[in-house]
Image (cartoon, helix red, strand yellow):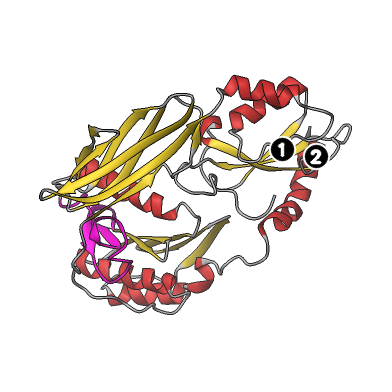
Amino acid sequence: MLARRLAVAALLPLLLASCAGTDEPETVCDMVGPRTVAAELRDAGAELGGSLRPRGDESPGLSVCSYRGAGAGVRVTRDTAPQAPLRYFHRIVEQFEFHAGDPQREPHLVFGVGDDRHAYGGAGAYWVPRYGQLISLRDERLVVVTLSARGASGRVRRRAAERLALRVFGGGRPAKRGDRRAGAVDPGMTVVTPRDGAELREDEVLVQGTVTPSDATVRVAGRPARTKNGVFDARVRVARGKNRIEVAAEADGREIGRELLTIKRVAPAEEAAARIAREYDGRVPDVRGERLDIVRSAFRRIGLRFTEVKLGGGRIEPKGWAACGTRPLDGERVQRGKPVILFTAKLRLDRASLTDCRGKF
């Protein structure tokens, strides 16, 4: 068992290199050095007892750098995965949902850092005072700066976080800042999830999105959706096969948005696993994009040994993760005595890619 793990560990860098390509962007630690962070903190009035020590953590689509020193701690994350806009949406919605009315925990709009006219709620960035955290979205990249420093007050601490975020967006140099006030946002509606054409195996789908103005009325499949702070959601039951779901929004007596989604409900998990096992012919099955719990069940039915390689962060939840690909590749003969390497990543209904899989598999 130990020998097998060592062999997989030795092969993993080569496998990932062949899958992910060589055009990975620069890391946060490379873009923003500890001296730059220290200078921003001192400008904010922080009392630093020495130099900051950076520590990076890299995974596909996510770069994290933590800077630690006496009396200060800064964490900067840059998310470039296709799901970054959705994660921005969920983080802001969660803060509004649970902390509305609390000035320390409720998000405060910040203008000029993110994409103010294209992000949720009319602002491309939000500041949460209680946590010293700036959450910002620009060019579909999510940058989160969390900052604590002895001696730095709330307002100047926020400005330091804004400047650090702009440096990340600028690839190390400060990106151009936009207007510091809100621009007029046109009325409209955006469905965030699911994407049109999504497939699922459950009998219910969650429809979520944003609407402007925040008091607009939204109907999903003919029924009123729950709307709060410009965010709407509704659960809709779906039958086997293709389902059409209409989402419409209205404000001041006129329609401001309408989308027609096609959602396909496919075979239940057990049926899908049985089909994969039934069609097995001694070659690695094509399981790309298939739910992880189904792939696991099918491989066990066949009797295939496999070792999972996780792409991206988070705890694996089999029904919420999917297969990205295998080594050997699908269609190739299974090598006697050797396990199949199974790459896996989070499953998504919001993007055409369906998963967090990056690169070619």
Q: Position of residue 140 (x, y in %)?
A: 42, 61
Q: Residue flagged by tag 2: what amino acid is it?
A: Gly
Q: Quadrant of residue 75?
A: bottom left
Instruction: Tell me, yes or no, whether the two marked residues, 2 and 1, touch with CB atoms within 8 Å.
Output: yes
Q: Residue flagged by tag 1: what amino acid is it?
A: Asp
Q: Which mark is residue 286?
A: 1
Left/right of residue 333 with respect to residue 276 in the rendered view: right
Q: Position of residue 180 (x, y in %)?
A: 21, 73
Q: Residue at point 42% right, 76% down?
A: 36
Left/right of residue 35 with respect to residue 187 in the rendered view: right
Q: Is residue 218 above or below residue 167?
A: above
Outermost residue on the left side: it is 252
What range of the chain is rendered magenta? Answer: 103-132
Q: Is residue 150 above or below residue 103?
A: below
Q: Residue at point 65% right, 30% down?
A: 295
Q: Secondary structure at mark 2?
A: loop
Q: Position of residue 14 (x, y in %)?
A: 76, 55
Give the camera-side residue of 222 and 271: 222
Q: Which residue is mark 2?
A: 331
Q: Quadrant of residue 328?
A: top right
Residue neighbourhood size for the residue with mark 2, other residues' Cα within 10 Å, grouped as few (<14), some (14–19), many (≥20): few
Residue neighbourhood size for the residue with mark 1, other residues' Cα within 10 Å, grouped as few (<14), some (14–19), many (≥20): some
Give the camera-side residue of 202 and 346: 202
Q: Is residue 240 above or below residue 284?
A: above
Residue 30 on the magenta span: no
